[in-house]
Each structure stands twice: as structure tokens, then as C-alpha cells.
Image (cartoon, helix red, strand yellow):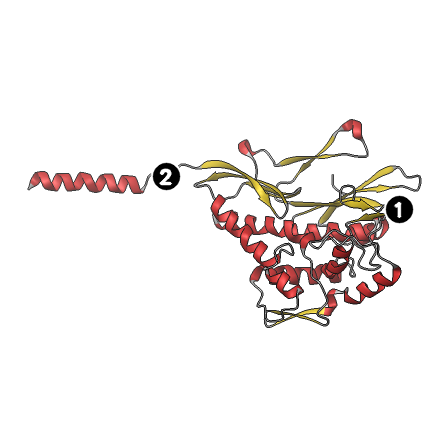
Amino acid sequence: MEIIKKSLFYFLIVILFSCHQKIEKKDFILKGGVFGTSYKISYLNADKNYQESIDSLFLLINNSLSTYISTSDISKINSGDSTVVIDDFFKEVFLKSKKIYKETDGFFDPTVGNLVNAYGFGPKKEKKNLTDEDIENYMKFVGLDKVTLHENKIVKTNPNIFLDFNSTAKGFGLDVIARFFNSKNINNYLIEIGGEIRAKGTKKNNKPWLIKIVDPVNISSGFKVIDLSDKSMATSGNYRKFRVTKKGQKYVHTINPKTGRATESNLLSASVIGSVDCADVDAYATAFMAMGLEKTKAFLKDKQHLKVILIYTNKNGNLEEYATYK
């Protein structure tokens, strides 16, 4: 009997010791494709690989907000289904869009979706050569003030209004993953989707999350190095996304919501950096491309929390840079 008692005692000791053993923490790098682009996620000192959870979150975002998926909530709403009850993802992006739409005096406007499609930059890829009359007709359906939220349903003043949140989808995706990491007490990570970035904490050895971006104004210097620890960064530019018609007309993917036209302003690239959600800087970068340089500079005067690197062409056609990020 004494032997049995001792055996049970040692057995309990082993169980208690096992329960108090620390789970080994590891660093992870995850790579893949989402939102029509690639992603890379680095997170440190975690107890497991969260690839499956992250894939599930990406799927939920797509099913809510992707205009490229015919069965998504936004696609159903765009096709005229007024019975869709939106989820929390859709609601957050919609309300955030409303806020930035007002702040930018309508230069950020996700109701330019019909024009995005018509110019060939949306899921329908129509590639029309729009006349002034065409643009005028499409502009009747532009204006986020024509869309409201009532009892978690989207209400449009005209069923032809086409919502397109793709200008903030990547940034919002980063925010969702960042919040997931925060809920798991992961305090050091860098998330990058298609060039948009959000970072928290530090890398190994307490080194900051530094990223390099090409400096097109000073090619000889190669890159700019930016500290993105505890910051978000998004870039919008027309130097890659454009098309040229047989007649030589150039259309860029940034649609000016004020004019309905897809022609370049003097601003070629806008990178926005801030200690805010990545969806916010994503939306601001889009708005700045439509605003052009001078309106953007005026807008930033009372937005000290936003830092920018703007690449533009001067009156002689040469590249210059306006930067508030140091």
C-alpha cells in the first residue's frame, strides 16, 4: 500500500511539473496570396503557427467586401439585393469610408465603382473610351452621401450605385490580422499585403522594423529607409496601374470622384504613414492621388498625425519630392 501511495505521489508530481512547463515560443514567417496580390507576415515569440486562422480571416473579409467574388455581400448589394444584412467587417469599412469621405470633401469616395469598371480597372474590365456624356451619366451614381446604413442594411438612393472598397481592402486586411495578433498577446509583428504595411513592437534584439522604399527622385541613392514600428503605411500610385488606348489616350486607375475622369494629376505617388489603422492611411493615399499636390499639402496642415512622401512632376516635367516624414 505504501508503494502505491508513493507511486501516486510521484505521478502527481510529474503531472504538475508537466502542466507548468513553458510552451516553447517561436518566430514565424507566413507567405501567400490574397486580395489579388501577395502577403508576408512576420511575428515573433508566438506559441503556434496561426496560418489556418489567418486564412479564415482573409476568407471572411473576401466574402464580405470583395467585388471580385460574385457571392460576396458587397457584390449582392451592388447587384441590387437590399435584403443583405452586413457583418461587422462591412460596417466598419463603410463607417470609416463615410468619415474619410467627409474629411476629404469627397476626394475619397468608394461609389466611383461604376467608373472604375468602365475604365477597365474593376472586376468587369469593360475598358470603355468614355465620352463627356458617358461620364456625366455615371456621375449621377457617384457620392457616398447617396448611401446610408439602416438596421445593418445598405440603403442606396439609386440601385445603380456601385460600391467599391478595394482602395481600402488591403489596409483593412492588415488591421484585422493585427487585431488578431493583439488578442493572442503577440506584441512584435510586421504585416505586409501588396506593399501596404503595419508593424508593432520590434524585431529580434529590439531592433526597429525598418523598410526600404525606392527613391525615384534620387535613383543614385537607391532607397529610403523608414522606421515603421507601431505605424501603418500605404502607397497609392499611377505609375503601374494604367492603360493606353490605340489613340494614345492614357487612363490611370485613380478616378477623380469630383470629375469622373481617370487622368493623372501632377501627383504620381502618395505614401502615407501614421500611428492609425492601415485602412485609414490606405484611404488617404487614394484621396491624395485625386487631390493632387497642392490640395494634399493644404489638407495635411491640420493633420499632424499623418506623414507623407509625395512624388510629383514639376512644371518642367521633372520628378520632385515633398516629404513630411523624417
Residue 313 located left or right of residue 81: right
Label 2's element? loop
Q: In what quadrant of the picture does the C terminus appear? A: top right
- Mark 2 residue type: Lys
Q: State the residue at coordinates (47%, 46%).
A: 52
The picture places residue 257, in percent across and down from the top left corner, at 80, 59
Residue annotated with mark 1: 247
Q: Which residue appears farthest toward the top when viewing the image? A: 220
Q: Which mark is residue 22?
A: 2
Marks 2 and 1, the one that precedes in the sequence: 2
Q: Quadrant of residue 165?
A: bottom right
Across and down, in percent, residue 108 comes to 75, 57
Q: Is residue 101 left or right of residue 21?
A: right
The image quarter in which residue 270 lies: top right
Query: Residue visible at 11% across and 42% down?
Result: 5
Observer-nearest of 310 and 286: 286
Check disc 1 and report its element: helix, strand or loop: loop
Q: Give the percent coordinates (x, y) of residue 223.
A: 73, 31
Residues at marks 2 and 1, CA–CA distance in whole angstroms: 68 Å
Residue 46 or residue 241, whichever sits in front: 241
Disc 2 + disc 1, Cβ < 8 Å: no
